[in-house]
Each structure stands twice: as C-alpha cells, then as structure tokens.
Image (tube, grey):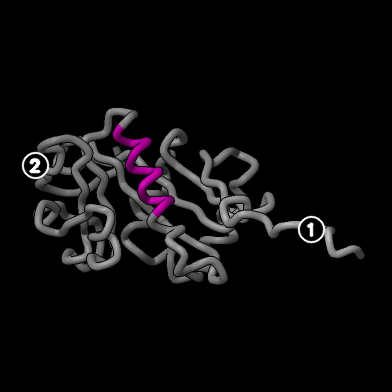
Amino acid sequence: MSSSAVAPSPPSPSALAPAISIERPEHARAVEALVDRAFGPGRFAKSSERLREGNRKLDDCSFVALHEGRVIGSVRLWPVTVGGAPAAFLGPLAVDADERRHGLGQALVEAACEAAAKAGWRAVLLVGDAPYFGRVGFAAGPAAQAIMPGPADQRRVLVKALVEGGDAGLVGPIRIG
C-alpha cells in the first residue's frame, strides 16, 4: 500500500444509531418477544395489563426502534379514560438489555408523546419510575387522584400534559377508553 492511500473512515455514529419508526403489523411478534424478555411472565399480573387486555393500541402513537432491521425497542400507547376524561396510557416501554443506557427508552417515550400530541391527546399516563420518567416531563402530583384498576402503587402513576392544562382534572378510575 502506498503512503498516499487513505484508509476508509469508520461509519458515522448516526449511521449506527437505531431508527425509530411507527410500529407496523410485521413488528408485532418481535415486540411481544422483546416485552417478554424485558418483563417476564409476571407482567401479566400487573394492573397496567388490565388496561391493555381487550384494548386496541393507538397505531399512530406506538413506536419501535430498529437496528439493522431487528426490533430493539418498543413503546405503545392505549386509549383510556380517567373519571370519563380521555387520556393515552403508555406501556409497556421495553428496550433490549444490550441497548440500554443509551437514551433509547427516553427517545421512544418522546416520540410517542409527540405523536399523541399531534393526534390531539391532552395527556399521557403511565405507571413507572418517577426519577426516570420525570426526565421527559412526567410527574406524580397531577395523577394523584387517577386510580389504577386492581392492586397498584398509586405513587407510581405519572402523567405528562401534552397541552396547557391537559393534566388537570384527572380524577377517578382509569378504564379502557
């Protein structure tokens, strides 16, 4: 090799970054497998699952993260009501164990919330870790009177307003919307 030859440059980090896109029907099986790996069979006992059973996910607000065509992350939103007021319910959020700590979960949550706002939803609810979800605008205070079905730690019920005042008046039972 001559001294004037240039070694090819490595791919840019953005070329290696996962692509976040709307979940399509062909992703469903891989998403279910990912969620099973992330949460195990115990996920079916959680009260959040009661809000997904018999419900239909919001197709325009549910996303996957793809790397080289493989699903490595997923987030889904579902229609619910809180005391009769409509809201979107986020969950499950799952990221492949090898891909965590790179901000992918937060990017998926932000994509879902942005899509929900564009679709006209006023607020997004979830059950989760306040320090983690607080970084993307979720808080427990406005959801303090939103009552999850079944046994649940009400302190973990969080909400994010998507419009001014969107988190006001969320009082009463959370039910399939």
Q: Which secondary structure, mark 1? A: loop
Q: Considering depth in this image, is 6 or 25 the residue closer to the camera?
A: 6
Question: Which residue shows up at 44% across the image and 71% down it?
Answer: 42
Residue 77 vertical position relative to residue 148 in the rendered view, above or below: above
Q: Main secondary structure of the magenta part?
A: helix
User: Which residue was labeled with disc 2?
Assistant: 168
Residue 74 vertical position relative to residue 131 in the rendered view, above or below: above
Q: Considering depth in this image, is 31 or 4 the residue closer to the camera?
A: 4
The quadrant of the rendering that contains the C terminus is: top left
Residue 112 inside the magenta-drawn segment: yes
**Left or right of 152 in this view: 167:** left
**Upstream in sequence: badge 1 or badge 2:** 1
Q: What is the x, y in percent for residue 35? A: 51, 61
Q: Which mark is residue 151?
A: none
Query: Can residue 131 be seen here?
Result: yes
Magenta-drawn segment: 107-117
| Residue occupying the far front of the picture | 3
Q: Which secondary structure, mark 2? A: loop
Q: What is the x, y in percent for residue 1? A: 92, 65
Q: What is the x, y in percent for residue 110? A: 36, 47
